[in-house]
Image: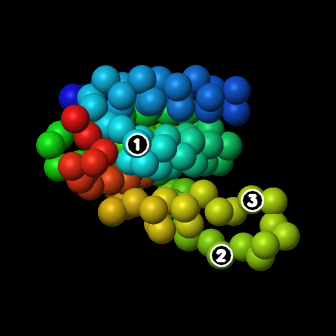
Amino acid sequence: MFAETAVAPALSAIAPARHWARDRLTEAGVRNGSLDTAILLVSELVTNAVAHARPPVTLRVHVDEERTRVEVVDGAQQRMPIVLDPPPTALGGRGVMFVDRLATRWGTSRQSGSKAVWFELRHDQSTTD
């Protein structure tokens, strides 16, 4: 299964993007902990894109037998994400750290005039149909 949607460049677009991703992943058979982890990481990537990048923002999900891959493309080719380790009192700065720690793999790629930030979660028999 492959699907993509445009995301408005506003913080108010985060919840609708998260709901869209949950619907697509559920339709593809992603379940239980893998679904919850994927939605948390979708929220982090979309938040970073709409808060720190430039439009257009596109959310893509791809599910096959082995893995779930999510990609967020935005127009800020020069602003690559970095893993931070903020102090416990910091109000933010943990999004990429969550992706780094919870995803099976993650990375970035530059595309023509844009960048993509992606993560993958490998499936196991208890999380998919």
* Numbered disc in front, either 1 or 2: 1
Which mark, by number, is residue 32?
1
Name the residue beneath numbered marker 2: 85
Query: Mark 1 or mark 3, which has the lower sequence index?
Result: 1
In the image: residue 83, left or right of residue 5: right
Where, by quadrant of the figure, is residue 97 drawn? bottom right
Tell me, yes or no, whether the two marked residues, 1 and 3, touch with CB atoms within 8 Å.
Answer: no
Of all residues, the one furthest to the front in this rendering is 126
Task: Calculate the distance from the C-alpha at mark 2 to the C-alpha at mark 3.
Answer: 10 Å
Residue 56 visible (yes or no):
no
Look at the numbered disc 3 and give the secondary structure of its residue.
Answer: loop
Which mark, by number, is residue 92?
3
What residue lies at 70% left-to-right and 33% top-to-bottom? 11
Image coords of residue 126 (percent x, y): 27, 48
Question: Label 1 amino acid?
Answer: Asn
Look at the numbered disc 1 and give the secondary structure of its residue.
Answer: helix
Task: Calculate the distance from the C-alpha at mark 1 to the C-alpha at mark 3.
Answer: 27 Å
Question: Relative to 8, is 75 above or below?
Answer: below
Image coords of residue 51 (percent x, y): 67, 43
What residue lies at 56% left-to-right and 42% top-to-bottom? 43
